[in-house]
Image (spheres, helix red, strand yellow):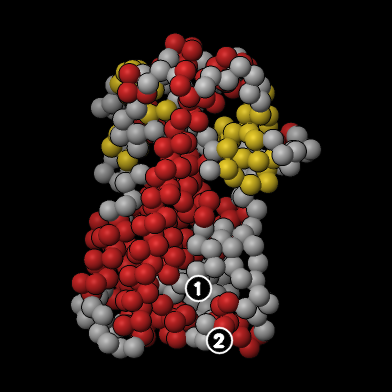
C-alpha cells in the first residue's frame, strides 16, 4: 500500500499510549486499555473503536479519558470521514494493524491447540455419559472452567472461530465453538454469571445426542436422504435423555439441548415448539449453532462465503431465530470483523473498515490507497478472510 511503514519502523506500542478525552476519540483508533463499560460489557485492550463502541464510551458518565495507541500521524487523522483520509495515515493504520495481527495470529495458534485438548476431554465425557458410566456435574464444570479460562482475548477467540470453524468435527469441536459463542451471547444479553455458566454447559453438550447415531451419517459426502435426516433430527431428544440423568445438573441445561433446533415459527424439531415455549438457552444456542455450522467445512459441503453465516442469522431473525438475541449477536460480531484483512475477487488484499447491517457482505474497505464502499462497487466482492 503506497509507502507503507514496515513493522520495525513503527514506534513500540508500549511507548505509544496516550490519554485522550472522550470527545477526542475517533472511529478506527485502537484501545490501549481494557474498560468496564458496565457489569455486563467489557471493552478489551486492542479493540478497534467502532460507532457502537464510541457511543458506549460517550454514554459512560464516569469516564473522562481513554487510553489509546496513537502517534502524531494517527492523532491527526479524520476517521469520521475515512474516504478523505490521507495516504500517509492510511499507511500508518495498515502498518500498525499488521503488528497487532501478528500477535493475534500467534494467540489463535495457541487457542487451536487448547481446543484440540478440550475436544479430547469432551470426547471422553460424552463416551461415559453415552455408556451410562456416570460422568457427573464436576467433570462438566471442570471442562467448562478450562474453556472459559481461555476466553480472555476475545479478538483472538473470535478469529479462531471465524477463520477455522469446527471443520469436519460436528460434535466435539463444534460443541466448543457453540459453547464459546453461547457464553458470549449470554453475557451480551445480560445473563448473570450462574446462568452464563449453565448456558456454557448446555452449549458444550448440545450435540451429545449425535453420539447415539451411526457416525456414517455425519461423515458421508452425500446429501442426507429423508430417512437419514429424520434420524439426525432425533439427536436433540437423545441428548436431552442423556443429560437429564446427570445428578445435580440444573434442568435448564437439558432444556437447551432439547430445544436448540426449535424455531419460533414452529418449523424446528424435535417438538415443533413456538415462541415462548422455547427456552432461553434453546434460543441462544440456536444462533451460535447456526453460525458455526454455516461457517465450517463439513464432509458434504465446504464452508459458506465469508458473511453468509451472518446473513442467514439476519434472515432467520425474522420468524425463526429470536430477533432480539440475533440483533445483539450481529452488532457485537461486527466489531470483530472491523480491521480484518480480506481477499477480493481481483486477488488483492483489502481491510474492512466499517460494517453495515443492511448490506453485510458489502462493507467499507481500504484497498491500497483508497477507501471503497463495496455497496457502490458491483465489480468487487470479498472472497475470503486472511489471518
Q: Quadrant of residue 211?
A: bottom left
- The answer to whether residue 88 is left or right of residue 289 is right
In the displayed structure image, the side of residue 67 where residue 84 appears, left or right:
right
Residue that protrudes farthest toward the right in the picture? 379
The circle on residue 262 is: 1
Residue at (63, 47) in percent of width and height: 384
Q: Is residue 82 above or below residue 130?
A: above
Give the residue displayed 32% in from the left and 23% down from the top: 14
- Front-lying residue, 351 or 242: 351
Nearest the eye: 215 or 19: 215
Q: Where is mark 2, residue-wise?
A: 231
Q: Is mark 1 on a helix, strand or loop?
A: loop
Left or right position of 90 against 43: right
Instruction: Look at the picture and state if 122 lies above or below 196.
Output: below
Q: Residue at x 44, y 65 (%)?
A: 173
Q: How far apart are marks 2 and 1 (CA)?
A: 16 Å
Measuring from the top left, give residue 314's x and y in whole percent: 58, 54
Residue 71 is at least partly visible in this image: yes
Amino acid at each position: 500500500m503506497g509507502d507503507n511503514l514496515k513493522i520495525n519502523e513503527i514506534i513500540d506500542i508500549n511507548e505509544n499510549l496516550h490519554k485522550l478525552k472522550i470527545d477526542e476519540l475517533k472511529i478506527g483508533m485502537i484501545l490501549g486499555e481494557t474498560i468496564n463499560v458496565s457489569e455486563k460489557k467489557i471493552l478489551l485492550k486492542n479493540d478497534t473503536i467502532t460507532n457502537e463502541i464510541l457511543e458506549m464510551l460517550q454514554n459512560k458518565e464516569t469516564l473522562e479519558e481513554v487510553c489509546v495507541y496513537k502517534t502524531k500521524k494517527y492523532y491527526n487523522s479524520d476517521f469520521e470521514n475515512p474516504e478523505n483520509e490521507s495516504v500517509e495515515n492510511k499507511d500508518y493504520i495498515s502498518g500498525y494493524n499488521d503488528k497487532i495481527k501478528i500477535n493475534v495470529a500467534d494467540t489463535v495458534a495457541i487457542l487451536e491447540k487448547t481446543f484440540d485438548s478440550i475436544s479430547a476431554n469432551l470426547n471422553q465425557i460424552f463416551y461415559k455419559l453415552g455408556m451410562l458410566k456416570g460422568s457427573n456435574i464436576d467433570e462438566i464444570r471442570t471442562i467448562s472452567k478450562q474453556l472459559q479460562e481461555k476466553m480472555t482475548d476475545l479478538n483472538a477467540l473470535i478469529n479462531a472461530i471465524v477463520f477455522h470453524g469446527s471443520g469436519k468435527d460436528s460434535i466435539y469441536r463444534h460443541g466448543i465453538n457453540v459453547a464459546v459463542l453461547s457464553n458470549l451471547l449470554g453475557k451480551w444479553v445480560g445473563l448473570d454469571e450462574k446462568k452464563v455458566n449453565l448456558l456454557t454447559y448446555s452449549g458444550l453438550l448440545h450435540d451429545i445426542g449425535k453420539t447415539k447415531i451411526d457416525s456414517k451419517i455425519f461423515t458421508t459426502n452425500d446429501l442426507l436422504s429423508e430417512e437419514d435426516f429424520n434420524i439426525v433430527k432425533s439427536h436433540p431428544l437423545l441428548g436431552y435423555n442423556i443429560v437429564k440423568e446427570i445428578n445435580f445438573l440444573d434442568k435448564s441445561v437439558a432444556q437447551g439441548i432439547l430445544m436448540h433446533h426449535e424455531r419460533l415459527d414452529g418449523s424446528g424439531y424435535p417438538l415443533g415448539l413456538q415462541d415462548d415455549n422455547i427456552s432461553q438457552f434453546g434460543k441462544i444456542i440456536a444462533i451460535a449453532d447456526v453460525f458455526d455450522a454455516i461457517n465450517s467445512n463439513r464432509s458434504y459441503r465446504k464452508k459458506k462465503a465469508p458473511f453468509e453465516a451472518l446473513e442467514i442469522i439476519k434472515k432467520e431473525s425474522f420468524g425463526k431465530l429470536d430477533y432480539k438475541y440475533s440483533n445483539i449477536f450481529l452488532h457485537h460480531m461486527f466489531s470483530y470483523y472491523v480491521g480484518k484483512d480480506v481477499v477480493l475477487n481481483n486477488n488483492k488484499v483489502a481491510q474492512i473498515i466499517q460494517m453495515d447491517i443492511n448490506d453485510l457482505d458489502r462493507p467499507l474497505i481500504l484497498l491500497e490507497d483508497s477507501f471503497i464502499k463495496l455497496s457502490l462497487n458491483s465489480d468487487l466482492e470479498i472472497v475470503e478472510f486472511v489471518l
